[in-house]
Structures are given as structure tokens and as C-alpha cells.
Amino acid sequence: MIRVFIGFDSRETVAFHVLSHSIHAHATEPVTIAPLARRQLGPLFTRERDPLQSTDFSISRFLTPYLCDFHDWALFLDCDMLFLDDIAKLWALRDDRYAVMVVKHDYVPKDDTKFLGAVQTPYARKNWSSVMLFNNARCRALTPAYVNSATGLDLHQFKWLDDEAWIGELPPRWNHLIGEYPYTPDAGNVHFTRGGPYFDEYRDSDYAAHWFAARDAALRVDPRMRSS
């Protein structure tokens, strides 16, 4: 079973549902998907939201291994993404040598702001944590106490690991940053990191047509289905 946690922000509810649909539409293995919603975490997540955090799940994403009882593997995804290929291909890349596996981006954001006027803060290892394949048993440092108290940079730069050699690398096609990287038909998972096409300002971004097609497919009801 492929276990997936997707960051949930009420300002982007549609993003969560379209991403979920795109995963199921391409998957060739069973998938479970859970929204990582702040209001559902209760006493597990008590820290105040920092003004620099652009989403409700900027920090809570690091509770994923704890929510799995530090057992097996789990995948965390930002909600502003869209799968164009089979998630089982990504899941198959799990490697027990590593505690976490990510796309190791090396770039400086082109813009100073992103969706809803949020500040685009540059820092080392930026966007590595937007797709994380967790080997949960090796992430025991990520207790609620630690996640609630550690700095954002310590979390997002993986300072909670004893050795950076425990960070495995995923192919870039599994976290293709739209607007930062050129269009490629090989992308398996695209990331609307500047803002999704559900915001008017980004309706014409790369892969927007794919997102709207996925949304329409998620809303479609076969007219042959009739209530008895």
C-alpha cells in the first residue's frame, strides 16, 4: 500500500482534491491519501504560525513519520502539485540506505513573492521538503516535541538527521518546479510552486491545461449513472 500525506490549506482546498484525483488516475497500485490538516492535528501541533510560512502545513509536514508510528515508508507532498505519471514508479525508488529521499534542487527563486502575496524566502535546500519519501523508522527525531520547537530552517534543511548522507536523491521529474525549470514532457509530478492555476494570476502557467483537465475529470459524472 502506498501511503501518502498531502499538505492541506483551506485557501487551496481544490488543490488537494485535484492532486488526489491525479494520483489515483495514474496509479497502478493501491494508494491511501490523507490530508495533513492543522485542525485535525489537535495537541500534536501547537506552535504558532510564523508570518514567513506561506501555508498551514509548512512545519506540520514533518509529523508524517510520527503519524505512521515510525513504521514503514510514507510520502509527503505539497498540495500545489499534479501527478502526470504513476506514483508507483516514485514509490519503487525507496532505498533503505536513506532516512528520507528528496529531489535535491539547486536554484535561486526568480520571484520575490508567490501566491496570495506570500514572501518567497530563499534558503539552502529550498523545496527539498516539498516532496519527501520518508523511511519512517529512521526519522524518530521528528517527535511532536521536536517539530513544535525546532526552527523552520533546522527542519527544512534536515538538521534533524545525524548525517546528511542519509538524504537520498530522487530524479527531478518527481518535483518539477513550474516557472523555475523549463517545460518538459517527462515530468512525473509538477509543482506549481509560484501559485496554482486555481489563482487567476497563474491560469496560463506551464501545465495549467493539465491541471484543468484533471479538475474536470474529477468533477465528471457519467450520465449513464442513474439513481434507482
Image (spheres, rainbow, N blue to C red):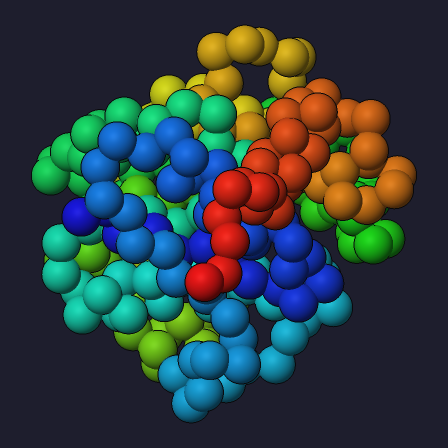
Quadrant in which residue 228 is drawn: bottom left
| Residue at position x 50%, y 85% in the image | 46
Side (left or right) of 199 relative to 137: right
Q: Position of residue 191 (x, y in %)?
A: 59, 34
Can residue 169 be seen here? The reply is no
Quadrant in which residue 190 is drawn: top right
Q: Is residue 72 above or below residue 189?
A: below
Residue furthest front as drawn: 228
Quadrant in which residue 193 is drawn: top right
| Residue at position x 37%, y 21% in the image | 171
Q: Is residue 40 above or below residue 95?
A: below
Side (left or right) of 53 relative to 226: right
Q: Position of residue 28 (x, y in %)?
A: 26, 31
Side (left or right) of 113 relative to 208: right
Residue furthest bottom as drawn: 43
| Residue at position x 36%, y 67% in the image | 63
Q: Position of residue 82 (x, y in %)?
A: 54, 35
Q: Is residue 202 above or below residue 33?
A: above
| Residue at position x 48%, y 25% in the image | 84
Query: In terms of depth relative to the viewer, which is nearer, 40 or 98?
Result: 40
Q: Position of residue 51 (x, y in %)?
A: 74, 68
